[in-house]
Amino acid sequence: MTLLKTFGQFIEDSKQIIFIPETMHSARRALLDWHGALIAGADTDTAARLRNAYSEELGMGNCSIVGSQQKTFSRAAAFINGTISHIAEFDDIFRDGAYHPACPTISAAFALAESRNDSLADLLEAIIIGYEVSTRISKVIQPSHYKYFHTTGTVGVFGAAAACARLLRLDAVQACNALATAGTFGSGLQQAFRSDSMTKPMHPGHAAEVGLNAALVAQAGMTGTPDLLEGEAGFGAALCENPRWSEIFDGLGSSWNIEQITFKNHGCCGHNFPAIDAVAHLLNLHAIDAEKIKKIRIGGYKATVEVCRYIHPRTPFEAKFSLTYTVAAKIILGRVRERAFLESALSNPKIYAMEDKIELVVDPECAAKFPLHRSAKVAIEMNDGSIYAHQQLTRHGDPDEPLTDQELIDKFYELTEARVGVKQAQTIAAELLGKPTLSVRGIAELWALKTAL
């Protein structure tokens, strides 16, 4: 049995699983959070350009596009919604794999489920399976994979393919073929988000489309390469060093990784979070006067220093990948949500001045704990010489310090109420976290027209 054959059998057997309420609730949380990220990206310039690029494919099919009154076919919907849901940088994280599973997995599964008018329960079960397969792959190829590759683009194809295979009720051979076909199209280079470009969000969009397409062609009888993961010239050999394939099935079926997902509390790159949370802790504990801060020293892990390297960012994109800016914004504005990335914030002289007081270095202890732990050490020195220090061992929102349902709902409302209206936002949240009455197609109708520009 190759690795993908085992996953294929797992997907077929999953049709017999009755998921416990706690696992289904975790899937509901993921689906709600994806909706928040999706709707938050709907009115951006990047989203408008993307919809315009697909204008020839809109106006046919029965799948909704966020921000458009026109519908399209499932593959295009997967790509467009998968891209738009990653624009605002509010989508979830699987910490152990340095991976955002929602945008590729849910975007693909939602498009397919809407095209088939599947039930919400069917979609939730498919999401659980898509998360399980892809998160397991993401975990055993790290940390070396993240040196050059954007895991959400590369591994996201497996999440999308597995979820869609589950929705289509493919047998073990077909599911293996879907995963194998998807895997050879996995892509996404980190260089794409080391400059201000619109490419990064297209990584999960591409992954969503690839995974959905792979499942559909597998259903039609197209075959893939079963040893694509572990083969001599396969995914692992090409994209990482010494993948731990022997660990990939540990505990498979006895626990579910969708219950171990990080939900973002801040609207920026997740590598910024530990420092933001550490500063927040010190501000709350000591009632620090921002005007009396002399210097802030932050020790983080290597990815924080390399990826979140912008100083005095000029654009929202750069700001989301700036440790100094997001920490300064937390101190001056109180939150690092959408308001922190408006032009008024980017040109705020108080944020600019606070940035100049921040020093970021690689801390050996924090670096050694990555990616299993996202930590930071912060020391705030005041003008009178006093120093307040804190070591943040995790991020608020990580599995060991999760957001409550209410915090998740509050975040969803903040991202959506201005775009779809208070009543509509409340209805979506009630459907996704409460007792559902609508199919996937009915849920899409709650936001599709309301977000049309």
Image (spheres, helix red, strand yellow):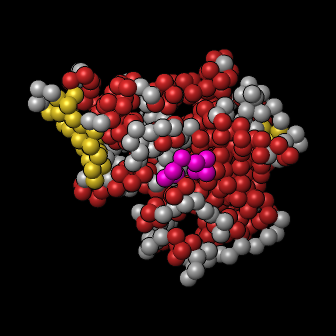
Q: Nearer the viewer, residue 200 or 429?
A: 200
Q: Residue furthest right?
A: 60
Q: Is residue 13 above or below residue 280?
A: below
Q: Position of residue 49 (x, y in %)?
A: 71, 41
Q: Is residue 179 above or below residue 62?
A: below
| Residue depicted at x 62% and y 74% | 228
Q: Is residue 179 above or below residue 399?
A: below
Q: Residue furthest top?
A: 423
Q: Position of residue 382 (x, y in %)?
A: 17, 29
Q: Position of residue 376 (x, y in %)?
A: 29, 45
* Res. 192 in view: yes
Q: Nearer the viewer, residue 355 or 254?
A: 355
| Residue depicted at x 62% and y 20% | 418
Q: Position of residue 430 (x, y in %)?
A: 63, 25
| Residue depicted at x 35% and y 25% | 350
Bounds of the magenta span?
193-201
| Residue depicted at x 26% and y 47% | 299
Q: Nearer the viewer, residue 379 or 328?
A: 328
Lateral position of residue 285 relative to residue 431, left or right = left
Lateral position of residue 415 relative to residue 370, left or right = right
Mainly helix, strand or loop, the magenta region?
A: loop
Q: Residue furthest left?
A: 385
Q: Is residue 30 magenta?
A: no
* Res. 172 in view: no
Screen quadrant of the N terminus: bottom right
Where residue 66 sits, quadrant-wise, is top right
